[in-house]
Image (cartoon, helix red, strand yellow):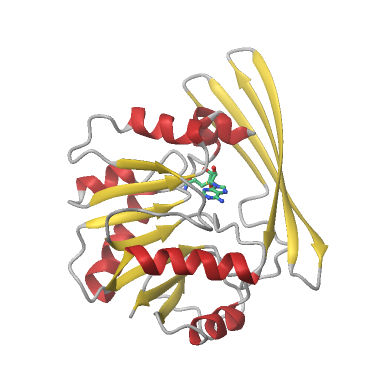
Amino acid sequence: MLYDYPQYYEIAFSFRNIEDEAAFIDKCVNRFSDIPVRRIFEVACGHAPHAGELVGRGYEYTGLDINRNMLDYAAYKWRSLVPPPEFIEGDMIDFRYAEKVDFAFVMLGSLYLNNLEDMTRHFNAIADILNPGGLYFLDWCVQFADPMVPRARNNVSMERDGILVESKFNTRLVDSARQMYEEVWTVNVDDHGRHRRFEMIERNRAIFPQEFLLFLESRTDFEFVGWWHDWDLEQPIEGHADVKRPLVLIRRK
Ligand SMILES: C[S@@+](CC[C@H](N)C(=O)[O-])C[C@H]1O[C@@H](n2cnc3c(N)ncnc32)[C@H](O)[C@@H]1O
């Protein structure tokens, strides 16, 4: 698993503009949150790339992930942040957190919910921790395009500190009726002449936009706020056929 090697994962995805993405979160809070936001909670935080920016903007940060290596890497990386971020190990489908939070988010399509029951349990868990009026932000988790089009760039080559990480993404449909597809992610690493190859297959269920709205309507605890593309609140998705990076915002009632 590449997730067991957080440093390589971090390099592979270092093409992102983390500062802009954190600024987008800040804009969502300022424009759409019904409550003041103190604690922010990230689902599937991985190495928590946004923790530094968010704490720098005055928020308290908690990250949840299922992978211990990722959490240890994140805790070490952000050890000198004040207030210190909190990292908890758990499954997004069913987790507990003793505190309430004011904003939750999930990045990079990292919502791994393989059926309606998992989806219901996940949103129940978020509803339990999120204060009424607080927002839940989902990056790339609702599929506006054909899910066969990979959610990340097809071929990415990134280099840092003498480590070269080359990633290739492909997607294949495995069960049309269940909207299940697999993302096949092949990563080649050249770490100062030491070569490693990772092949990861992530099975996921596509969540389509109108299905997502119906899902929200079937619940009493969340309301739809809006959806935009490409980190731009001036670009709502409505009326566009070509959606680059769907960003969805909902609010806890
Ligand atoms: C694509 S990475 C995203 C990491 C980080 N949020 C980012 O933006 O780079 C997906 C993360 O989801 C975590 N993950 C996978 N299944 C999970 C689950 N059921 N519950 C919690 N985390 C999970 C993995 O361990 C991995 O760190």
Q: Quadrant of the C terminus?
A: bottom left
Query: Image point 30% across, 42% down: which residue?
Result: 86
Asked whether, in this view, residue 228 is left or right of residue 120, the answer is left
Direction top: furthest residue: 193
Choose top left, top right, bottom left or bottom right for residue 199. top right
Query: Image point 29% across, 56% down: which residue?
Result: 40
**Front position in the image: 49 or 37:** 37
Choose top left, top right, bottom left or bottom right for residue 149. bottom right
Residue 195, image x, y percentages:
68, 18
**Front position in the image: 154 or 77:** 77
Q: Is residue 149 in sight in this rendering? A: yes
**Front position in the image: 146 or 131:** 131
Q: Is residue 63 above or below residue 148?
A: above
Q: Is residue 147 above or below residue 32?
A: above
Residue 227, image x, y percentages:
45, 76
Q: Is residue 238 above or below residue 125?
A: below
Asked whether, in this view, residue 104 is left or right of residue 161, the answer is left
Query: Image point 43% across, 75% down: which residue?
Result: 235
Asked whether, in this view, residue 109 is left or right of residue 55, the answer is right
Q: Is residue 231 in sight in this rendering? A: no
Residue 160, image x, y percentages:
48, 26
Residue 198, image x, y percentages:
70, 31
> What count of labels does the image hold?
0
Choose top left, top right, bottom left or bottom right for residue 137. bottom left
Q: Quadrant of the N terminus?
A: top right
Query: Image point 58% across, 13% down: which residue?
Result: 192
